[in-house]
Image: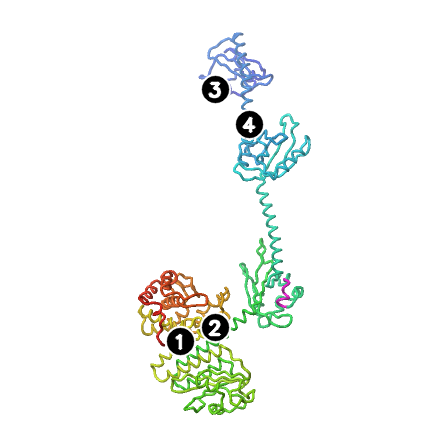
Amino acid sequence: MRWEQFPLDEETPIGQAIRTRQPVFLGDHCFQTLFVHTQLTDSLRFKSTAVLPLLIGERVLGTVTLSFIEDRTFQADEQEFMQTVTDLCAPALDRARLQQEVDHQQIWFRTVNRNSSDIVTVSDGQGVIQYQSGSVERILGYTPQELTGVSVFDILHPEDHLAAQRALSQLQPGSEPISEILRMRHREGHWIWLESVATDLRHNEHIRGILVNSRDVSKRIEAERARKVSVEALQETEQNFRRLAENAGDLVRQYAPDGQLEYCSPNASDLLGYESEELLCLGPLDLLFEEDRSVLAAAFERQLPPDFTQETFEYRLKRKDGSLVWVETTFKAVRDQITQEVAAFITITRDIEQRKHAEFQVKAQLDRYQRLLEFTVSLEHLTDPLTVVREALQRCLTLTEYEYGFALRIDEGEPSVLAVEGQPPGMPVNHAEGLGQLPLSPLLQKALHCRELVVVADDESVMAPPEPLPRDGWRSFSVLPVPKGGAMDVVLVFGSTQAVKTSRETRLLLNNAAVRLGHALERSGHLEQLNTSREETLRALGLALEYRDYETKGHTDRVVHLTDLLGRALGFMGPDLDALRWGAFLHDTGKVAIPDTILLKPGKLNSEEWAVIQRHPSIGFEMLHHIPSLPAATLDVVRYHQERWNGSGYPLGLSGTDIPLAARVFAVVDVYDALTSERPYKQAWTHEAAIEQLCQEAGSLLDEGVVQAFLHVVKGHDEGHMKQVPEM
């Protein structure tokens, strides 16, 4: 056991030396006498000891203890020597302790300095850095040594020089600190926003400079800028909304969640005849046409789903003058960004009167041609000539503007009534039988002789000499000779008690009906002619489009011919080949429902017009799919002939073998004929150029196997041979 392990109380030599601040020299006898209570082990027993206190003035640093195993008496010179050594050790130990404390404080200061969130800078009055804390490296990337002696203006943003100079000029000893937010260049080149607080300590003998504490506030500045930009953007958005709403062609309204109208754009007067202020006093359903009110009322009453964003409705509104206008309104929900609750509804309403009118025209044309197709189908299933004539008379009346009609059989120049549908007031049925004996005008006689449709307006005479106008019961009428070739020579006569302006579509329809009826009468003679007549009927449907779209004249016959050749090459035969050929006849049936303003437009179609054109395969399918006698392959050609191998076609975007084979076969023929035909917007391609284009599209737009088969079919043929179509 060592002495320093004993309790440092007055009962030990160390305690006595510390208490008295005097050295203690003890031999064995004195040690045992004075410190008899101290028990030492045998291994640590000693005979004499010297304990000298380490003193710095009156402060005791500790003791120097010397122990000897022999009993000795310490002489005066020994005591003086040991005291001298002790006196030398005391200040050395004290200096070492002080240096350790200084080193600890310096390490603590450097650590705190380096990890502080603030930069501490001391500079002179001109901004030259005299001291830089270690935290500058973490914030600006420079070491303190790199910035010492450097002017702060060397790393200060040029736009902030004036503010820094002004702050330096305002600093005075004893003045309040000055705060500025400045940009400092990071060592990597970008700028850091610092909030700096400068205090003038040039009078302080320890500092002798300007003390600046700087904190990185870049994120705060960015957040403030972002908020400012957000507020400005919101304000600009609101201004733009008002500007757009006030100048847009559409009517813009804003409703509260309870349905109260809060804002209405000024163009309400253009659409509805009301001023904006007048609409603010009306409910959301007040102007709705009664027949359309239930649809919108149900929408307002139902619970909105959490993910509701917008919904569009079409309905009619009542103008201030009482007239109706078709509109399309998109309801958009505006939600609170925090609660996601609906804060308002924005509605954008546009006039779609013209579009709806066009849709109604398309629907009317579709209905008319649907009935025409049904008429064609009905003729296919009838064999009795008289029944065929009656069916034709009834169907034609449903498809035209006329009120009544007669079917007359001309036998050796003598007319007889076959069928009557309706009857004009005051005119007996047998009156029509004298049509052949009436003194008709030369023009009408020539038309009857040439088997041409004659349309007579209410202000035109048909007799020689002219009859009094207007005619009683026959204000307007038409005479439709049916082409000869069957067992009967038939003329259809249609009339009206009112003046009728016969449309171009009606003329085409009657001509087509006459052709169909003539074919039907001819077919009734024998079964072989039945199949031939079917082909002619389908061809007539294809040609009906050519009457409307003269740019495609001859297209139907050409593609039917080429489709037949290609189908045979690919192994089509019997009913399958017939179905493929009929599909070629009917492929563009849907175009009969396309308005003339679009189908015959000489210039480039806009997006809306092109969208109408793209509907024709679907329209054709809808018109034909319920006809039992048309095979599935025929309907496939009608519906899918505009689909492309890579899925870029329409109407369904089918690709690859998902496209029925019959449609893929016809698509190749259709593309070839389109390339080699002249259009107002392009010259006809040569046969060679068209073949090269087909090869380029093989595997991308067209079935490569079908293209190869087509190339084999046309191998060795020039364009003239390909265009040569046999009489049908």
Toward the viewer: 438 or 487? Answer: 438
Q: From the top left corner, tell me how far across and down residue 500 is, in percent.
A: 54, 81
Residue 694 vertical placement versus 441 (above, below): above
Q: Amino acid at mark 2?
A: Ala
Residue for badge 3 = 1
Are circles 4 and 3 on residues that touch, CB within 8 Å? no
Using the image, tell me which numbered label, if any, was put on residue 539. Answer: 1
* Between marks 3 and 2 in the image, the one whose residue lies nearer the viewer: 2
Q: From the top left corner, tell me how far across and down residue 110 is, in percent.
A: 55, 30
Residue for badge 2 = 593
Give the CA separation, mark 1 to mark 3: 128 Å
Q: Amino acid at mark 4?
A: Gln
- Which element carries disc 1, helix, strand or loop? helix
As drawn, is 707 to the left or to the right of 315? left
Query: Which of the 4 image quarters holds residue 490?
Result: bottom left
Q: Earlier in the sequence, mark 3 or mark 2?
A: 3
Residue 432 vertical placement versus 725 (above, below): below
Q: Earlier in the sequence, mark 1 or mark 3?
A: 3
Are circles 1 and 2 on residues that touch, CB within 8 Å? no
Could you tell me which residue is drawn at 38 percent across and 87 percent down?
487
Q: Earlier in the sequence, mark 2 or mark 4?
A: 4
